[in-house]
Image (cartoon, grey):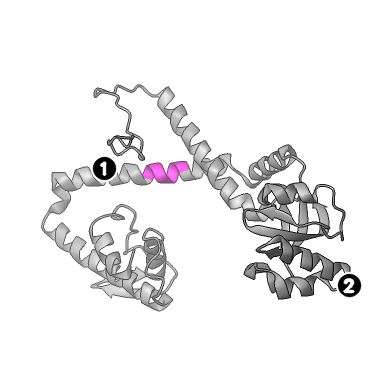
Amino acid sequence: MTIGNIRNALLAGLILAAVPAFAEERADQVAARVGDTEILESDVTFATSFLGDSNPEATQEARKSAVVDALIDLKVVSDAAIRDGMENDETFKRQMTFLRQQALRQVYLAKAAAVAVTEDVVRKAYDERVAAMPVGEEVRLRHILTSDQAGADAAIREIAGGMPFEEVAGRTSLDDASKGKGGDLGFLTTEQLPPELGTAIATMKAGETSTNPIETPFGFHVLKLEERRKREPPAFETVSAELRSGMEAQAVGKIVADLKASARIEKLVPDVAMPDASDDGHDHGAN
């Protein structure tokens, strides 16, 4: 959402039910005044949390100013609506009922999910997944890529004659991504390698260089196996947020299902499944 849309989003009532009472007294700074009503810094922070990302190119001060302008507009227009008796308008009442239910649902599920998915629960799920991971291996490789076998054979002869692998790779390899690093590909799993290279390194020892070129669809390779190590699982800190998000989604689904199971519900319209998002209704088969 851009800054120019912030004001419109608020005036459209997207967060009408969630904007705090401006007249409420709080021990924080005043950001603006509309008549006798103060718009506080905490009101700005609260409203900002509902607006999502604003223009990433704008400064923090510009984004804050736009939110304050939006809250000023919201206050001015809502006061005018009250003076015109809009609080008794049936459309307004229906909208407020819907927004209130929506806000209550959001708050209830967020708190219920937080109770169900604690730090200990996330940590336990992480430990269980790590324990279930198959034991794997990573290898650190260097390679020299040539367009033909003659070039690869020449590189092998240079290395066998005492020329450092890194120097030969930097001078002759066609792989621009690794030649500047002496052909270093970093740590990889066998699954990340072309199958021909995976087969070639299966019997190689750390520090060993291949004595014959290995052909793949990319060309001819000369390999040096630098190191073998056990594949470590991703650190908890790097996956905990994604893991928590998935667990919270599952928890919310269960909470809603349990609540519906205990409620008396009558759906009086046909229960029709939504079409798959990838199905555009057209036959894309062969003519």
In the foreground, 178 or 139: 178
Residue 41 occupies which quadrant of the picture?
Answer: bottom left
Q: Residue at x 36, y 35 (%)?
A: 276
Q: Residue 252: horizontal and vertical position, in percent?
A: 48, 38
Residue 37 occupies which quadrant of the picture?
Answer: bottom left
**Does residue 233 appear in this view?**
no
- The numbered dot on residue 97 is 1
Q: Is residue 76 left or right of residue 1?
A: left
**Tag 2: amino acid:** Gly
**Does residue 277 appear in this view?**
yes
**Distance of label 2 from label 1 (alpha carbons):** 81 Å
The residue range painted magenta reads 104-109
Q: Residue at x 65, y 63 (%)?
A: 147
Q: Residue at x 32, y 70 (%)?
A: 3
Instruction: Please give the residue where the numbered disc 2 appears in the rendered image.
Output: 162
**In this view, 126 is above or below 34:** above
The local secondary structure at tag 2 comes to: loop
**Tag 1: amino acid:** Thr
In the foreground, 151 or 100: 151
Q: Residue at x 62, y 53 (%)?
A: 217
Main SS class of the magenta portion in the image: helix
In the foreground, 269 or 44: 269
Q: Residue 130: horizontal and vertical position, in percent?
A: 72, 43
